[in-house]
Structures are given as C-alpha cells and as structure tokens.
Image (cartoon, coloured by chain):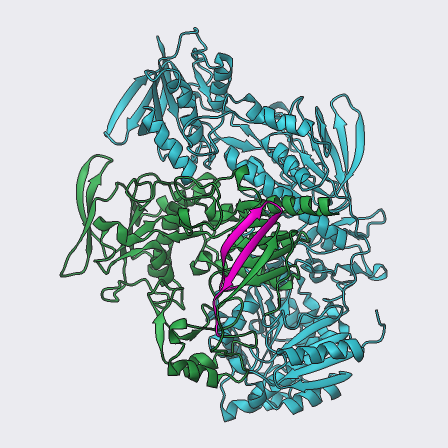
Chain colours: A cyan, B green
Amino acid sequence: MADEIKVGAYICKGCGLGERLDCGQLATIAEREGKANLVREHEFLCNAEGVAMIQNDIDNEGVNKVMIAACSRRSKTEAFNFENVAITRANLREGVIWVRPDTDEARETTEEMAADYVRMGCAEIKYMTLPHSNAEAASNNSLLVAGGGIVGMTAAIEAAAAGYPVTIVEKSSQLGGSAAFEYKRVPEHMPYADPEDTGVAEMIARIEGDSKITVHLNSTITKTSGAPGRFSADISTESGSTTTENFGAIIMASGARNYDASQLPELGYGKTPDVVDQAGLEKLAMEANGGPIKRPSDGKEIENIVFVQCAGQRSTKEGHLPYCSGHCCLTSIKQAMYFKDQNPKIDTNIIYSDLRTPGAGGEDFYRSGQKKGITFTKGSVSEVTVGANGPEVKFSDLILAQEVNEKADLVVLATGQVPNSGVDIDLPVTAADEDIDLDNLVPEVKVESILNLTYRQGPDLPHLKYGFNDSHFICFPYETRRTGIYSAGPVRRPMDMAQAKEDATGAALKAIQALENARLGRAAHPRSGDLSFPSFRKEGCTQCKRCTVECPFGAIDEDKERYPQFNESRCRRCGTCMGACPVRVISFENYSVETVGQQLKAVDIPDEFDEKPRILVLACENDAYPALDMAAQNGNTYSAFTRVVPVRCLGSVNTIWITDALNSGYDGIILMGCQKGENYQCHFVKGSEIAHVRMSKIDDTLQSLSLEAERVATYEVAITDIERAPQLINDMAETVERVGMSPFKF
Amino acid sequence: MSDVIATNQTILVVGGGISGVTAAIEAAECGKQVILVEKNPSLGGRVSQLYKYFPKLCFPSCGMEINLRRAKANRNLNILTMTEVSAVSGESGNYSVTLKTSPRYVNENCTACGECEKAVEAEFDSEYDYGMKKRKGAYLPFNMSYPQRYVLDPKMIGTPDADKAREACKYDAIDLDMQESETTLTVGAIIWATGWQPYDADKIQPYGHDRFDNVVSSVEFERMLDPFGPTGGKIVRPSDGKEAKDVAFIQCAGSRDHNHLRHCSRICCMATLKQTTYLREKFGDDFKASVYYIDIRAIDRIDDFYQKVQADENVTFVKSKVASITEDKETGNPILHGVNTEGYQRYSNPHDLVVLAVGMEPSVAKDSFPIDVKINDNGFIEADEANGGIFAAGCSSDALDVNRAVQSATASALRAIQVVNRVAGTEG
C-alpha cells in the first residue's frame, strides 16, 4: 500500500447537477480548499466511461482516496465499487439539488450547500484509511455444539456435511435429548397423517459413523474464551477431567425442559398418577411399545383420555408461562393417535382454546386426527379432581355454552417448554447486603451457565423475552449479541421438532459464516464485509471502562493491566465504543472522531449577520439517512442550511462532535437514530438508547455556553419517516429563527 | 449487463423476495458464488408491499435496506431481475439452467433521475398496489426498488409515449429495441424461493369480493396504510372514500377450506391482529374491529401480541365462519351473515368495510415446475432427497411468516453449500 496520500475528487454533472450547480466552482473548491491532488469533472460519472476514468486514475495516477461528488452513497454503489482505495461521497443529488427548489432565490444557498458537501467529502477522505484486514484473524474451522438433542445433532450433521468438523458436548449420558424419550414424532412428510419414528436412532448412527463429528457425553462446557475463529473451550466430564479445545464458532442448542407440572395442583398433577404431562404420556407409550397403554394407578387399559391444552401456558397467572409453546397442539393430536391407532373405540378428547396446527403439514395432521375420530372441544378447563374411579375434568364447553364434568381414565396436561438459556446476564447482581433475614432465607436456585463465557459482560447469551435467547429482529432471526455464538431450537424460541431442525440448520450456516468472516477479518451483519476494527491509543486511555460496559456485543474485555482488550472478530463495527470514549482514543481506520470531526470543521460557517444558520444533522446510516434520501427522491424539501453527516449508529456519536459544533457556531444540531426501548429497532441494540442518554446530559454544555437547550434535539426516526425527517429539520430551522443565531461564529 | 459466469460450484437462487434475498446473501457471505434471479423489475417481493411486520410493528423496509446494502457490497453475488428460469436439467452438483430475461427497455446507464416518467402520459395499473392505483408507463416500482432503475411497461412500446421517454433521457439509458434474451448456465445447487401469492379472493363467491366495493382482501388493506399507496395512508372505503372505522376481518378466507386452500396459511391471524392496531393508530379510540375466526393461531412467544389485542376493548372476536356477505345498497355497508358458534346465535352484522384475510398460495403451480421435484398436495415443495440439489426456501416450502421464512432460507443456504462444497472437494 502506498504511503503517500493521493486524493482524487470527482464532480459529476449528471442528473441535473451540471445545470443546477456551478460544478466548475465545486472543482475549484475541491482543489483549493479540499486540497484534492487531482480533480475531475464528468458529464455522467457513473457510466462506463466515467468509472473507467476513475479506475485509470487509481491504476496510473496513484489515486488511493476517492471522493465522489455525485449522488447518495446508497445509489450507484456497484458502479463506484473500486477495490483497494478509500471511497467517500459528497451527496449532491439526494442531499442537495433534490431537496432544494429550482428557483433563482434558492440558487445561492443551494450552491453553498453543495460547496460544503464537497469540502466535507475532501476533509473526511483525508482522514480515512483503507482498512487493513484484521491482524488478529484466526481461522479455526471447527464448530462447538452445546447440547446433543435433536437440535445439536442436526446442527452437527448439517455442518459436517458441508465439510466442517464439529464437537458436540452433551451433559447427559446419551444423545437424543428429550426426543429420545418420545415414542413417535409428529409427521414431517406428506401425507402428514400418522405419527412416525422419531429418527433419533438413525441420527445417532449417522453421527457415530461421521469422522468429522466428535461427541463428549456426560460433559459440560466449563469455560469459553476468545472470539470467532479462535474460541477456546474447556470441556469437563462429570468425573472432573477437563480438555481444552479450540473452535471457530459455537452453536448453543441447550434446548428446553418441561414446565414443572407440579405447579398446577388445580389440574390434579401430583394428586394422582393418572394425571400426567405430555412427557409422562410419552413414557407410558414407550413402555406399552405398541400394546395397549395402561393407566399408571392400577394398570387398567385406558378407555377414555382427556387432553388439556395450554395447561399453565398463555396465562398471566403467577408461575404460569405467558407464551404458547408452539408444539403442544400437534403433540396432543399425535398422542391421541397413539390410542386411536390402537383401538378406535378409545375416547380421546382434546380440550383447547385455539387449536394451533399451522401450515400444510399441521392442518393435514389435524384433519387426519378428525378422521380418526379424535374429539376436539373448544373449552376452558377450570379444575381436575380425583374421583373414585379416576380423574374428572371440569370445564366450560364454549360451543354448547355449558359446564361439563368429564370422567377420564387418564388426563394429559399439555404443559409448555422452558428454555435452558443459562444465566440471565441482565439481572442485577445480588448485592451482599446486610439486611438478609437469615431465618427466612430461601435457598437460591442456582442457574447453571451453559457456555461459561469469560466475557466481561457475563457468561451466557443475553436473554430476550421470557428467557429465550432469541434474536430481536423479524428479518434476522439469527442476529446474535455475541458474534459467532448462535442459539438454535427451543432455547431460542418455543418450537416443534420440525422447526427445530430447520433452525439448527440455519444456525449452523450462521456459525460457519462467522468463522469464515473471522478468517478474513470481516464484519458480520449488518456491516457485512467491513474490514475495519476498533483500535485504541493506550497512552491516552484512562481505564474508565465505558467502552467495555457499553459495547452492545460484549466484544471488549479488560486485560491484566485493566486496559480495554478489543476482540475484533466479536466486534460489529458500530462504533459505540468510539462514541463512549471520553478521551477519544478509540477509532476505526475508515471511521473516527477525526473523519466526522473534520467534516464539521470543513463546513463554511457564515458570519452571524449573514442570517445563514448552519444545522448539523447526524443521521443513522441504517434508517434516518435512507429516509432522507427517499424524501429527496419524492421531492420533499428541507432547509438549505442543513448539513447531513451519516453515522454508523447514534451510539458512535462522540459528544465532542456536539461540543465542537456548538463552539464553532452551528446554530442547531439534530441527532437521528432508530427506535429505542423494548421494541428497539437499533441494529446495534443499544446504540440509539445510549445516545439518547448521552445527549440528555448535553444541557450542561449548552448552559456553560449560554446556549438555548432547544438547539440540540435527538429523535427516533424510522426509515419510513419520509415526510417526518425533513419536517424535523425544518422545525429546527424555525427554532433557530426563533431563538436567533449562535453567537459562536468566527 | 455484464456476462454472468457460473460453474457447478455456483448456487442459483430463484426468487428475490425476502427468502431468496436472504438465502443468496447468506450463502454469498460464506464465500460462495451466487446468482439470484427475480422475475419482477425489483427485488423485495411480498414483504416490500407490507406496511408493518407483526408483532413488533416495525417496517419491512428497514431490514430491506440492510439486506440491500449487504447485497450491493458483495462481489460474490450476481443479481438478475426480470429473469425467470425456463428450463432445468441435470442432477445435484451439475444442473443446466436456462434463464429468460424480459426486456426492461432501460439499461444500466439509468440514474433514476425520473425524467422519463415525467415525459410519458400513459398510465397502467400498478402491480405493486394490486391494481388499486395507476402508475406511469415509465416507472420505478417503489421507493426502495433495487436495482434503482426505471422500467418501461411493455404495453407502451411502439406508442409515441415510448419515444417521448427515450427523448427525455439524457443518458442513453432507454433502449426500445431491447429484446427478450436467453442464456444457459451451469450451477451446482438451486434454492427455490418463489414464495407465495395471495389467494384470489374473487373465488370465495359468498363473500362477494368481486361484487362489493367495500369487501377488500388483507393485502389490499395493507396497501392502504402506505403513505405513498393508493389512499395516501388513509383507511377508507373504496365505494365512497369515507373513513372506514367499523371494520370486520374474516379469517381463513380461502384457507382451511376444502373448496379453496386446504392448508392453514399461518400468517393471517397475526396479520389481522396487526391490522386491528392500524385502526387504533389512525382513529385513536374511535374505531371498531370485529374478527370472525375459527382458531386464533398466534403461535409461540408472539401469543402476547394476541393477548394485547384481546385487551383492546374496541376489538371483538367472534368464533364463526362467516356464511355470506350481502350489501346494503343504500349505505354500501357489507352485511355479514352467520352463526356465532359460541352460544349459537345467528347474526347479520353491518360493517363499514370487510377485510378478507386471504391465504397464501404457492406462486408456482404444481404442474409448472421446470424440473421434477416432490410437491405435496397443498402445492409446497417437500424436503426430500429425491429433489437432489434443489432446496426450497421460505414460502415455497410451507406457509410461513417472515421470521420462519428467513430461518428456512438460511437453512437452505447451508444445504446448497453442502452440494457445492462436495463438488469443490471432488474437483480439487
């Protein structure tokens, strides 16, 4: 790589830029003020000839930094996709001429807007470096799978089939998980009519015959450190021996356990052996092994059986599960068929509130159940009592609108799944306080960690709702807050076996992708392919720990000397650490306090009496910036005094930018980030939220400068805010008009 | 268009909706060569026509932006729009695929400046808006279209409007002589992600979607919420443009029904629950929603969204399969007739507007796949070894919501990678 910086600035005259703007003047600005080494104008920069011109300058003129003054960075990305050079854009089309009216009186301020964007582009590119790939890049290509149930086995088989070695760590003495204790499974193939073999034995045989898969039974993961591409895990057996192995990525398939049915005494569980949960029925079916299923209390052949759906589920009662476990309706139909297929005369009644058998297979299976004579009753069970001849189910029949008391030989409670998601790292740590009432000390249920991560931010994946390690995003079910570690199966979300296998396969893909990314030092989604990573200047660091605490991905640990230790392949390049750092020692090669700070400084701030305020907009590149682009595309206009700078995430906004901007005479500042809070839309989890908190403290700065509080505003902006985003800018322009120009102009 | 290079280590993804886009990007980000073909002029598929997703009520375009950025940045991924697969032969690890590309009449010189659109006069039904709105003969399908490049309607070719469009373009981007083209490629594996189409509501005769203005389908209702859509983001009655504040939702319209789609389309319950929140969003407390249902299938942890809507006093749930709809000629109100099975009361309920929660039908008819794959009675591709190196992703495999479709697409990417890695292994 050439050490010498050579900036090429390219001014496009297409799309009306040539007619609306004085491009010759912009070229002069790029050369004189922007100090670009080479400046060219072009009639139509994104066509083959324009692109070839730039490529030629890169190849033959030594240009290694390219500043393109044309359309938005979101447009014509493929055309301006040059390798091995740093690239930036001055957004003259969506950012200037499309948001300004084409009138004589607007001409001057529009021109000034364009001139500033050219200055900003030149300033930014000077401080940007083409990212080198990660020096830390490591390339272990084997996978660690925590859990040897259906999910873990599927992940292992599928990853191995793609050529990747896999190690399964299973706590119990056998593979198969809960499925090993099931008689049959819900069918996964047409005609979706009958229960089928669980396939567990076949999977185990396949794993045993696959040289790429290693299995540790009776083992747990007692320590996990490192990062994608270079994880190190201690695998310990029950007997206490430990081996340490290295892995590229991890799949957490720790599954779910059955809800503790003894919490449902009102439904008779525990009062008689003839009330069982679904797992209990599987056990009876396995024992019967195709013969008649007998009731536990007296061995009588079962003649009628009642299934109670949603037992302790979909309920806000204390101790109940608030969610639906997804599989139980299908499972009850399957279990009713154990009886019907044996002897059609056995009465099987499934009492449900909503029967949930989705999709093609689900509905076909439900229909098959109806054909086999299973009774489905829409009802609400209030109580299961123990009568002389067995349990009795009391329920309201919601169709016939009557109270019913049904006697049964056996009652099956369709209880739900509880995820084995390990330690909830977001729970406040119990303080060793002195007020503990020793007499009434409740023995603390110790939750065992699944992964025992040595991460600064805790030993397991963060939990989402109800204790599941799910992704928060609809579009990105495998989004993880610990890069390279993917949860799959019912630990991620309640699900049935067929979906769990699909999920395991998807998670295996993501794990493979993570180690391939790590090999190349490449970022994972959403900044896929970004080769930059944070570096810090140790001399300046005060060990304040804000970066290690605020990193949404737990990427930063602390070293022995208590300095931050960046684990690049865990990093998602959001820049939240950079925004957090009070002494500004953290930077990326292509994004730093300087690359943005210099843009702010490059803007021409007219004299106070010119009545030309400057409004700085720091817009999240994921949502707010596209919203502004689309506003432009639709002909919305906003104040010509606006200067928009895209940021990776509001979390990356360092308050020094705000302070500097206020000190250098900006009249208003707007931060536009994504939705925060429970239903956050921030792609970096907490960035937007953190920024809102940081900005709530900016009032002190404003006060010390004797500036009005309303000069700085922080908003949540969605990508669909095509009307609102420009409106927010115009509102700020009005505010500035009202409170007056900043006195800090030089 | 640059020449497409493909080998038997290339993965072909058919369909550029969220499943196809996901499968393509996920595979490409593992370092694989991927060709993504989409029949329409833009990527995005059905989700691009949605206002919000359940249960978060967030915007689909947000995820699309990220996915497009990932796609644009990836050199392993080659995207061909207006392209269909016309023939497939061969076997896992070695397929020969014929691709047919329809003329767009606009080349890559297009800057999406919009001058051609201003110049032409002819208007046609907007596919994006299910025909509820007109668009120009030169058009960008929607705000986030990708490629961000205009299209000329083939019906305009040969008319003076086409010449006007060409004359308006300063960049030689309009090529009226563009012809349909065909190429044949070799690929190792194929991910089939052609998705779904809304079941034709006109076929449900007793509901009168073809006869009554104020009976719309759920996908049409969804378009009303788009500020750039046919009603500018307002929930109004098609008959008179009045605000529709008393809305009935009919579940399983065409699903779980022997006369129509036998399967449960999975998404419709959640979609309706979501759409009731649109009414609250637009009208505050001044609305009424009535949901006529068989079972509310708010499966797994998103059941809490159902609980939230149930707690809304303005939303009523009626367990009933609606028998028929008639129209009050004077008011234009649709009247729903049926029996509430909870208590067996007959009803004849008038509403301002009826939304039919239509089902998901596989986009490709059972007998029109270009190669023999195992398809179930409902028209979805079965996971079966007999399919060789062809893998279904998303709604071509089952009726799935977005989250599960993406899950399926991600899994299909691994299955395809297994094939091409095997090829790479044997070839060295």
Asked if residue A328 is positioned above or below residue A584 in the image, the reply reads: above
Q: Which residues are magenta?
A: B81-105
Image position of A518 with respect to B164: above or below: above
Q: Can residue B219 be seen from the camera position used here? A: yes
**Left of B384 or right of it: where is B8?**
right
Q: Position of residue A460 (x, y in %)?
A: 67, 39
Most frequent secondary structure within the magenta stretch: strand
Where residue A726 sits in the image (x, y, percent)? 50, 74
Quarter holding the N terminus of chain A is bottom right
Instruction: Assess whether residue B247 is covered by the magenta stretch.
Output: no
Q: Residue at x 30, y 41 (%)?
A: B257
What percent of the width, then of the height, locates residue A35?
76, 84
Magenta residue check for B104: yes
A117 to the left or right of B105 = right
- Foreground of the two, B290 or B239: B239
Examine the image and state in which quarter residue A683 appears.
bottom right
Question: Could you say where residue A539 lies in the image, as x and y percent from the top left?
Answer: 86, 61
- Screen quadrant of the C terminus of chain A: bottom right
**Which residue of the protein is positioned furthest toward the left in this rendering?**
B330
Answer with left or right where residue A649 lies relative to residue A736.
right
Q: Quadrant of residue B341?
A: top left
With respect to residue A136, does A701 lie above or below?
A: below
For this rendering, which residue is in front, A409 or A702? Answer: A409
| Residue occupying image coordinates x 51% and y 13% | A287
Pick the front one: A179 or B171: B171
B227 to B300, vertically: above or below: below
In the image as oriented, which residue stretches furthest toward the bottom?
A: A104
Q: Is residue A494 visible?
A: no
Q: Residue drawn 63% across and 33% down? A: A152
